[in-house]
Amino acid sequence: MTTDAFALYGTHEAEERPVTLTAGRLTADLANGHLRSIRYDGIEVLRAISYLVRDRDWGTYSPLIEGLAIKQVADSFSVGYTAHCDGADASRLAIAVRIDASESELTFAAEALSPTGFETNRCGFCILHPIVGIAGTPASVEHVDGRIVETRFPDQIDPWQPFKDMRAISHSATSGVSARCLMEGDTFEMEDQRNWSDASYKTYVRPLALPWPYQIPANERQTQRIVLSISDSRPAAVAQAAEAKPVTIAKGEKTGVMPSIGLIVTPGEAKATLAAAARLAEIGPQELLFHFDPLAGHGPAAFADFAALAKIHRGSTTLEIALPCTASPAEEAATIAAEMAAAGFSPDAVVVSPAVDRQSTPPGSTWPECPPLEEVYAAALAAFPNARLGGGMLSYFTELNRKRVPPENLDFITHCTNPIVHAADDLSVMQTLEALPFITRSVRAIYDDKPYRIGPSTIPMRQNPYGSRTMDNPGGKRIPMANTDPRHNGRFAEAFALAYAAQVIDADLECLTLSALTGPFGLIAGENEPSEPGAVRSLFHTVKALAGMAGLRWHECQSSAPSQVLGFTVEKAAGNALCLVNITPQELSVDISATVAEGVAIVLAPYGTAIVEFPANG
């Protein structure tokens, strides 16, 4: 089946296809100089080993790779190349890489050298451990002082670094197979990347408590080495070729109610949203989430536009306020309330968060000055007495996990997620879906049954808590922390949104916001885009379908391959509907006999979605 790449990804630019390297039972995918999906006997031992260079805003360089040489024989492989980074002020950095592997050991060595000096926030290795099947299991951590500590990978998401001063970490990949990862050349520590919705635990070089950005001196070699050792105590067995089987979907035990669906509206997009009122009515979202940030220049005129939209909207409305806190919270909240009243804008709910809390406070850093959240919420309660009060973070779960808001006077908790904080390749973005159930379970562990909202959560990044800006992307590439992303325009985004809903619905969400109507996060195309202005993006169909399911009862579906296909069913007036999504770039056959009727199977296109209607007794 031939699929138009532009329809899938919103760009004709193809990702580099990985080269699969094999050393007996050890395999790894090489792409852009990184090792991905490192497996032993088909079992994922490590998710990745990468040598990364970050700029002062934590943007990741895309180095030019020269001299790539790959050698493979039956029981070993080797790779060599040099990666070149061009930094600010004509600074340069070159990294010479050598990778060697046998069936039981893989070595990844790198030597960085700058002829000019080079500014960076981080330069060195990142090692990713998978989370599914690993979270909560035992680990042995060897520290730089020689101590060995028997511990466990965090189950509930750790807000800080679970392990510091690391020299090596060992874990059991499966019964009888253990993996030890030795890290040389610097001091390493681990962070729980599920905070950012990454599907990994990340062990990285240079502790965050040290100053950054920092300078790599000119002509001073920086040498690091990672050694992965595999120990297999199982009886010898004859390897058998895996038989291609269709993915099967079975009925699960969990059930609940589908959340309301929201759309985000910024002051800059309010008039365009109003002009597209017919499309808004066609989608039928239950919630409009209005954004207001005085520090971004938003003023009273925004409330007039918000009031006009609220008048034509048939659902409820929420205003999120990034409170400047340059004066007293009471004074600022009262001023905003007066401006809203003058414009005739009276939202059903208000979310208030200090503007400074949108920026992350990394471990070892000094927390910025901020009024106590109790004072902020008291000011909001006084200024908006007729609105429900929400709290949490206008940024991501990371910030909520590190600065847990007092819930006593809040009517609901909220946060966002973003899948391109650390990596933006297609596989990494889809893998972030694995982290979402861990995030929602962690929120529930902290806030119990407090009403809970997520969003806006989109592939493009609306705000960067880890630097001074989001990354401009005029070339329409796949880059981390970008404020636009080509995949938002393609079927990729449609699949991501439906899979996102499938992964979070068992958290009993009150509302889920996955897009705007217009603009770079929107469901319809604007000016200067390949599509005709006003044309619907693929994502439009998923958001419309989810809005139509709001309030219906859902039932769990169990996939035999959740890294490929996800799904759930909903009870509808005329019967049931099975919602399926393929989160891979391959066509997949899906056996739905156990859910719909005996002998029924469907084929899902790459990043394809399907809603299969069937009788309630099917």
Image (spheres, grey):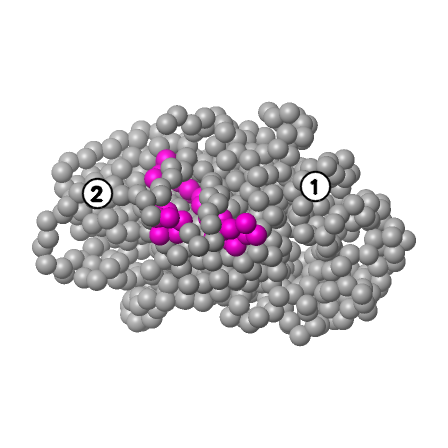
Task: Tell me which residue sits at (67%, 58%) in the image.
Answer: 356
Under circle 1, the secondary element is: helix
Q: Which residue is mark 2?
A: 243
Q: Is residue 80 above or below residue 259?
A: above
Was residue 88 drawn as part of the magenta stretch in this picture?
Answer: no
The segment highlighted magenta reads 569-597
Q: Which residue is mark 1?
A: 280
Mark 1, other Cα within 10 Å: few <14 / some 14–19 / many ≥20: many
Q: Amino acid at mark 1?
A: Leu
Q: Is residue 125 above or below residue 402?
A: above
Q: Is residue 131 left or right of residue 329?
A: left
Q: As drawn, is 484 to the left or to the right of 599? A: right
Label 2: few (<14), some or many (≥20) within 10 Å? few
Measured in 3D between alpha carbons, the distance from the residue under mark 1 to the one under mark 2, in whole angstroms, is: 47 Å
Query: Residue at point 56% right, 60% down?
Result: 257
Amino acid on which the number 2 mark rests in the picture? Glu
Can you name the residue that lies furthest to the bottom here?
A: 408
